[in-house]
Every structure is written in C-alpha cells, then in structure tokens.
Image (tube, helix red, strand yellow):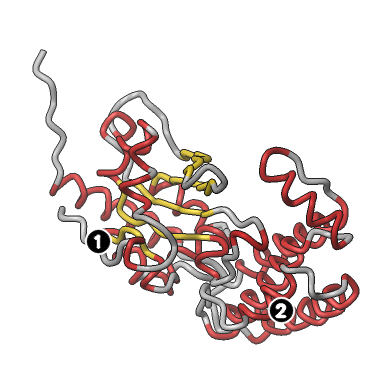
Amino acid sequence: MTNTLKKSASDNHYGRPMNKQIIKKDKLLNELEPYCILKGYRGSIAHNTYEEDVTHDDKDVMGIFVPPEDVLFGLKRMETVERMVDEKLSQKRTVVWDIVYYSLPKYLNLVLKQNPNVLCILWLSEKHYIKRSSLGDKLVKNRHKLISKECYKSFTGYAYGQLHRMTHVAPTGKLGAKRKELVERFGFDVKNASHLIRLLKMGVEVLTTGELLVERPDNNMLLEIKRGEWELQKVLDYADSLFRLVDEALVRSPLPNKVDYHFANELCKWITINFYKNNPPVPEIY
C-alpha cells in the first residue's frame, strides 16, 4: 500500500510537520508510523479555536494504525498509545503536543459507542489531515455509515461532564496549572465552558443533518467564551437552551438507531487484510 499524504502540517500555519519533527522523538510512535493509515489534528486546531498564547492551548493529534504483526499475529497487545511531547521552540516558548494513537479495532469500537472525539477525525477539514492513506480514506468515505442516534448520548454525556468540570473540578498537573489560572481569573473554567457549548451545538447539527461540523463556523463565539468574555450565567442559560434543542433534534433525527456492527466489523477486516496484502510480513526463518 502506498500512503498518500494529502496535506502536511507544514502547508498551513499550525507549525512544522508533526510527523517529521515530533514522531521521531518517541521510539514507539516512530515504529508505528508505517502502520498509521489516518492522522490529523483534533481539539482546538481542528475546531478553528486555537489560540496558544491566549488560552494556553496545546496541539492535539489523533492517529489510527493497523495492528503491527506482533499484535495481530503474536502475543503482544496494543490498543492505545498516548504521549505528551514538549517541543521547545525557543528559550521562552514551548509547545506541548498531546498525541493519541488508536489501533483500528479499538478505534472502531469507540465509533460504535459514538465517542465524539474519535468521530471527529472522519469529518476534518482537508487542511487538518496530517496523513490520509488510501485505507484511511476508506474510513472517511464510509463515515455516514458510522454515525447513529446514539451520538445523542455521547455528545450530551460529554457536555454534562464539561458543565460539571467547569465549576467543580480543580485542574491538576502541568497543563492544569494553566487552566487553574483561568479559573482564578474568571471564576470558572472557560475552556470547559467553550467545550460545553461546542459539543451541544455539534450534537444538534449531526442529529439534524448527519454531518459533523468539526471546523466550527461559530468559532468566534467559542473563542469569546474561551477568552472569558462571557459571564458564567450567560453560558449556563445558553447551554440550557441547547440541551432543549438537542432533545428536539433527537426526536426528528433521520439517523439510524445504531451503527451496523456487522458493517464496522467487515470494514475493520477489509482494511487490515488489504494493508497486509500490500505490506506482507516477512517471517524469520528458524
């Protein structure tokens, strides 16, 4: 199989090519790179709400890989690889990359649960794909068969989580210190507030149209919230109206009740088989 790189991160304003500058810093990610069939930005870059210097955003990346030979045929187990990689740009500036790679079976199992984070990579704007092979493109082209009414539970569930965290949970850890600064300044976590509104609006949209608008047309409003330009009560009132709208959208939604498990399973098998047809493992001779 020939991997076709549709657009490199070097072709836009989001920084140097992630696959060349960051992946090679981590041995496991570097080893997985030939097996990666789809990779793109997630989070604020994908949503067009990235403001590193204003809202302390890191750079989020997701990849999907076909299980390597030792995992597929041997005893090794690997479903998810998560990394936080610091990229030092200067003495005063460091960018943090939050990277997650899912094996194809793990990814599709999360899709069956309609996880909002994993669904988004199937609806990225072209410029936000870092790597999109012909087999990764097979996932993207079948995205409408991988969405269902069950996304209502996941989008609203994640939204309720953001609603709770924006006022009740104290951030911890390296990145948490920056988030804590926002809470102390505005009285609530404005990034959680922005996620809350975005998730609800995306939930209404996908239930109504069957499309996920990952690159947000309302990014200016979301940035206002993330910058702390909205009072807490305004966020709560708007969220309340959106919860009602997403409930109404579920009733009218043309989406199927569930994703077809058989289709997802066959898609997983087809991609894996075709990957190894073009990249056959070379067995050692004992």
Q: Which residue is mark 2?
A: 246
Q: Position of residue 88 (x, y in %)?
A: 48, 42
Which secondary structure, mark 1?
A: loop
Front residue of 54 and 50: 54
Query: Residue at image x 32%, y 67%?
Result: 11
Label 2: how many Cα within 10 Å (few below 14, some 14–19, many 20+): many
Q: Is residue 240 above or below residue 84?
A: below
Front residue of 218 and 138: 218
Asked whether the beta carbons under mark 1 and mark 2 sit within 8 Å of each other, the answer is no
Residue 51: quarter of image: bottom right
Q: Position of residue 201 (x, y in %)?
A: 66, 78
Q: Is residue 133 above or below residue 101?
A: below
Task: Please count the marks in the image.
Answer: 2
Residue 6: quarter of image: bottom left
Q: Left or right of 234: which side holds 144? A: left
Q: Position of residue 79 (x, y in %)?
A: 45, 39
Say whether disc 1 or disc 2 marks the residue closer to the N-terminus.
Answer: 1
Front residue of 201 and 216: 216
**Residue, far left:** 285
Q: Is residue 202 above or below residue 60?
A: below
Front residue of 58 and 257: 58
Report the disc number at residue 16. none
Residue type of the residue flagged with mark 2: Val
Q: Position of residue 10 (x, y in %)?
A: 33, 61
Q: Left or right of 6: which side holds 187? A: right
Single out the mark in the foreground, 1 or 2: 1
Query: Residue at image x 71%, y 79%?
Result: 246
Query: Residue at image x 37%, y 38%?
Result: 29
Residue type of the residue flagged with mark 1: Leu
Q: Which residue is mark 1?
A: 5
